[in-house]
Image (tube, rainbow, N blue to C red):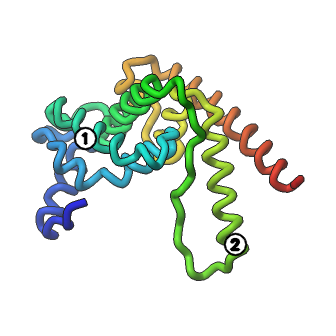
């Protein structure tokens, strides 16, 4: 990644994104600005959607190339993160179709360095993160996306529905089933871990 932009430029882009999220009439936010501001979010979202670590850089680039081709983010009913997540879903689906003959399990490499805990606590945190990723893999792509956008990113169901051009009740249904399947899968993984 490039060096961070100067503080005044960062403040301008933060204000531009905030105005966009608030629905204020403002110009489009270009792909370069989106990349500087949202690359970490998109990378994390791609990981949670099952993107292999070895494919992450290429997938991340594909998302922002697609954002560039679309002319950047235009303020509307969905915030920039929701819009980028919808592009990421397209990239994930396209890559899954391309490698349908050679599926491989997703890797969990996201970690949270913490020097205050000992090796046992760090090991348990890593195992919990692996259980979360494994539970997410039990969800359909639509359920996983709705779950991540609503539960993790705090997007409203109305915003997700408008972006996906589906009735809001469809989002509520996907979210309901996603929560149920996620909790069941997580509980099974946790039980297997305790049993072994």
Whether residue 188 sits left or right of residue 170 in the image: it is right
Q: Residue at x 70, y 33 (%)?
A: 180
Circle 1 SS class? helix
Callout 1 crowding tier (Cα within 10 Å): few <14, some 14–19, many ≥20: many
- Quarter holding residue 3: bottom left
Residue 57 vertical position relative to residue 94 in the rendered view, above or below? below
**Does residue 158 show up?**
no
- State the residue position of label 1: 64
Cα distance between the residues tagged 2 and 1:
37 Å
Q: Nearer the viewer, residue 40 or 56?
A: 56
At 69% from the left and 72% from the top, the residue drawn is 121
Is 156 on the left or on the right of 118, as rendered?
Answer: left
Q: Nearer the viewer, residue 14 or 123?
A: 123
Disc 2 target residue: 121
Callout 2 crowding tier (Cα within 10 Å): few <14, some 14–19, many ≥20: few
Q: x, y (%) of residue 185?
A: 73, 39
Image quarter of residue 21: top left
Q: Nearer the viewer, residue 161 or 72?
A: 72
The residue depicted at 15 percent of the width and 43 percent of the height is 30
* Residue nearest the observer in this picture, 75 or 33: 33
């Amino acid at each position: 990644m490039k060096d961070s932009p100067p503080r005044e430029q960062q403040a301008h882009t933060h204000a531009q994104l905030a105005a966009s999220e608030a629905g204020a009439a403002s110009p489009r936010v270009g792909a370069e600005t989106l990349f500087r501001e949202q690359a970490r979010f998109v990378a994390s979202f791609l990981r949670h959607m099952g993107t292999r670590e070895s494919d992450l850089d290429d997938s991340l680039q594909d998302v922002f190339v697609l954002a560039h081709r679309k002319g950047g983010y235009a303020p509307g009913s969905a915030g920039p993160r929701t819009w980028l997540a919808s592009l990421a879903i397209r990239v994930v689906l396209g890559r899954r179709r391309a490698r349908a003959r050679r599926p491989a399990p997703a890797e969990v490499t996201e970690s949270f360095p913490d020097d205050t805990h000992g090796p046992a606590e760090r090991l348990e945190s890593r195992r919990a993160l692996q259980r979360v990723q494994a539970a997410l893999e039990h969800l359909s792509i639509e359920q996983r996306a709705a779950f991540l956008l609503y539960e993790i990113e705090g997007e409203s169901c109305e915003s997700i529905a408008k972006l996906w051009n589906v009735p809001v009740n469809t989002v509520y249904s996907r979210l309901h089933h996603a929560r149920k399947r996620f909790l069941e899968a997580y509980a099974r993984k946790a039980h297997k871990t305790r049993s072994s």
